[in-house]
Amino acid sequence: MRERKRPRPRRPVAAPVAPEPARSPRRTFLLAGGVAAIAAATAAAGIVILRSRPNVPQGATIAVAQPTFVGAESCKSCHAREYDLWQRSDHALAMLPADSTTVRGNFDNAVFTRGGVTSTFFQRDGRYFVHTDGPDGALDEFEIAYTFGVDPLQQYLIPFANGRYQALSVAWDTRPAAAGGQRWFHLYPNEEIGHRDVLHWTGQLQNWNYMCGDCHSTNLQENYVLATDLFAPTWTDVNVACEACHGPGSRHVEWAESGRVTNDAFHGFTFALADTSGSEWVLAEGDSIARRTRPLALRAELESCAPCHARRSTVWGEVQIGRALEQTYRAALLDDPLYHADGQIRDEVYEYGSFLQSRMYQEGVTCSDCHEPHAARLRFDGNALCSQCHLATKYDTPQHHFHPMNTESSQCVSCHMPRQMYMVVDGRRDHGFRIPRPDLSEKLGTPNACNQCHTDRTPGWAEDAIAQWAGANRRQGWHWSEAIDAGRYWKVDAAAQLVRAIQDSGTPAIVRATALGLLPAYVSPASFPAVEASLRDSDCLVRRAAAAALASIDAAQRARLGAPLLEDPFRSVRFDALSSLLDVPRQEFTTAQLVALDRVTQEYRDAQTQLADRVESHLNLGTVDARLGRLDLAEAAYRTALRLQPMFIPAYINLADLYRAQGREDQVIATLQEATKRDPEAAEAYAAMGLSFVRQKRLREALPLLAKAAELRRDTPRHAYVYGVALAEAGELQRALEVLQDAHVRQPAHRDILAALATYSQDAGDRQAAAAWARKLVALSPGDPGARQLLQSLEASMP
């Protein structure tokens, strides 16, 4: 299992959702409708889409009759060396039956107490047990079925009668005692987690079937039955074995046993795991860094590692090993709070998204250049690993790293791959291979490797030290992180910064895609061409983000620009295009486009059906049906989601919005009250409930709810905007201005807030202030006639 922050699945299934409308002046100047207009226009909340990936030829898979899995033992006789290396690897130890050879924890009546719960670990008749709090909060006895992982910690899986396996949140620290290990510890030491919390070890977010099994076992088949909510899981190998990377091996075994010479380049496998270009690393005379002799032909190796080494969501349940990642998954972009603005790891994101940002990836480095794939260990220790390609006489010297030799500070990874701790004791290195930029720490508040060691010093001190060492050769100037930061925090130059990052061909594709994901909040005639051009980008990450960004424009344009992406070779792109096109009137499409639209809609439904054990799939189905006007089916889907996971707040939000569309305001309130009872910090639920009261003309009852939403999510400007508009309509004009001014300080580029400040300052009799706010709005949207008209009317009314 993986460390979680608050209730959020590790890999939520991405949905075609109804996104918040773009912050366009067109919508801004509907302010005359006030909070009632906002309440009437509220759309279904949906769920967050996670994004990312590189450009990989689709031809990595060869169409042949379906092979089958045969298990690792079938590989041993021909591949004894690789099999031996694998048996000692973390992959082989990813999950095993609990017995005296696999259990590392102290089960000699060891006691661990936390949060008023005392857990006791003991053995009986050669079996392993824990006495701890169960799903009802009462202490009970549970048998350990499997070990889960081995270094630097080991978790334990407990079976339940419904076919589920749950991962205990009290884990064993397998590090040596001298390093602080050989102890029981809790994976969430700073959170109070009761038995009703989805993060409790008996909850869905600690469920092996739902969260973990596909990456810790080989050929896992969940065999889930929705009607009974039961699993009957099976696998070929209980751990991560040969076929988890190479794909099903029956035809390869047939090829090997036949002894026949054939022209099968893949020897019975369905794809080539190794690159077939013949490219080699060569250090040319006079150079200090090795280069590939030719570009890689395939990225199949990286694509095979990525599903379990990426923060990603699932878009297709039938996994086909060797296919490009985005056929089956949607990898996360550099979104907040997953990554810092400069792409450094923050939440638990694994390695893939960082690697896609790196110069190493761009130059053709693959996972196995550094990691021996069968032993799952580094090929060399220390700086010798980097010296494979980087000349040691230049880079492994104090003249380069400016630290004493043979110290931790002189290690390449200390500066270029800083480590972040996850799961309390698991240190993982950032695979972005970035050059430390303390100057960006000063500008953006991002971390840097220098100050991670020199914690008593400032980023300014670190920047001065680098300037003294490297002088004019140090990295300076604009960096794409400034665009991501501006987009995240509504800075005045956000639109220009984001467009700059998108249009810079030297910027990594995952960064350009991230910038495209932020741009719809600032879309305008000046910035939209960046979206339109990205629809034809060679990288599917960029196309996917551009497809999603189309939701910010009018229906006719969406149909014209987005329909071609329904034929995109990558499933994740097709699904994001569907998200933007689903509620476009059908008369906007040609006959051929309608065929494609219906085909992808069915493909999307099939995907959700395959993933029926995931609550997000039922939310997704409900969202599709709601957008198509099939309200009964949508309601049933949302209720199925809540049956499976009563704490799943997005389903309450969407269900309430469904009732809103039918005018059933009493059921809106009841549904949202249940949501806030389940999660007292569900800001979206308070906001939706407040808007329901507004629609019922119960403004005084709405205000405290809108205020609570704005306070809980100060990073979401729409909540503050709606609260400010409601205050003004309630006659509390000065308080409205205070709320909106406070929000403007946090999000200076939010156009709705600026328009409201201009309007309400005028209402308060302060025309000069109103004109000043309007000038800021025009500066953000110089080509918008509505903004200019507002400013001109204000200036004309001034003495």
Image (cartoon, helix red, strand yellow):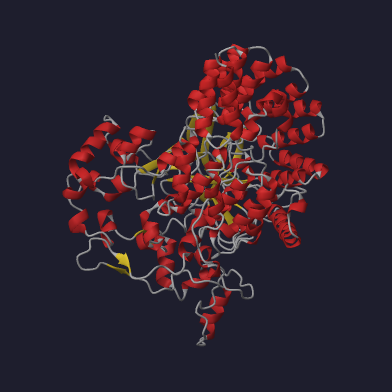
Which of 10 and 447 lies nearest the eye of the viewer? 447
Mark yes or no: residue 455 visible. Answer: no
Q: Residue furthest bottom?
A: 260
Which of 408 and 258 lies nearest the eye of the viewer? 408
Q: Quadrant of residue 172?
A: top left
Which of 559 and 320 lies nearest the eye of the viewer? 559
Which residue is painted at 76% across and 61% down in the image? 591
Relative side of 416 to 263, left or right: left
Q: Quadrant of residue 8?
A: top right
Where is residue 500 drawn, in percent x and y? Answer: 44, 45
Mark yes or no: residue 785 visible. Answer: yes
The relative height of residue 666 versus residue 478 in the rendered view (above or below) is above
Where is residue 683 drawn, in percent x and y? Answer: 62, 27
Total marks placed? 0
Q: Quadrant of the C terminus?
A: top right
The relative height of residue 47 versus residue 257 in the rendered view (above or below) is above
Which residue is painted at 78% across and 48% down in the image? 227
Where is residue 274 drawn, in percent x and y? Answer: 44, 70
The relative height of residue 226 versus residue 121 in the rendered view (above or below) is below
Where is residue 459 drawn, in percent x and y? Answer: 29, 33
